[in-house]
Image (tube, rainbow, N blue to C red):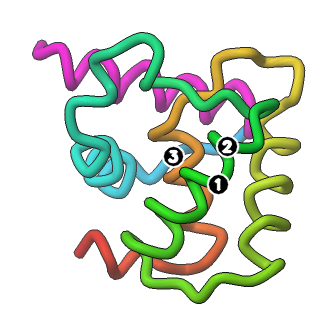
Amino acid sequence: MSKRDELIEKYAEAIKKNLGETPDMDLLTKVTIGCGPSIYNADSETIAASQPNELETVKNNFLIKKLGLSDGPKLDEAITACIEKYGKSDRNKYRAVIYYMLTKHFGKESVYS
């Protein structure tokens, strides 16, 4: 099993444990691949949900640039909702899982088709 496959399995487990749902493995795989090399670095693999500049990066680089959404309060609300659903007490909020959740939240699975 490749390192990427191991990480995808880890992210799938996080979705099962934290969200209580069975992940769409095809979408999760595509979102993980879309994260590029950041998944291999312990610091960039996770999102520091308590740092406003990190949340701005998620909004600008993922929601606006990748998913093609327009800036507005709905983006910030979605990020906050996903972080709360993930569990504020869980320090390791994996970037791929947050991106997966946001993709599903906005119904933008077609971006990864």
27 sits left or right of 95 in the view = left
Question: Residue extending furthest left?
Answer: 2
In the image, taking residue 44 as reference, residue 47 lies left or right, namely right
- Tell me whether the residue at label 2 lies in contact with that at label 1, contact meaning CB atoms closer than 8 angstroms: yes
Give the image location of residue 13, x and y in percent.
Answer: 54, 23
In the image, residue 16 lies in the stretch drawn in magenta: yes
Viewer-nearest of discs 3 and 1: 1
**Residue at x-position 44% and y-position 53%:** 24
Which quadrant holds residue 10? top left
Q: Position of residue 7 (x, y in %)?
A: 33, 20
Tag shown at residue 56: 1
The outermost residue toward the bottom is 70
Residue corresponding to mark 3: 23
The residue singled out by tag 2 in the image is 53
Q: Start and end of the magenta stretch?
A: 1-19
Q: Amino acid at mark 1?
A: Glu
Question: Which residue is drawn at the image coordinates 38% and 47% (left, top)?
Answer: 28
Q: Is residue 42 left or right of residue 103?
A: left
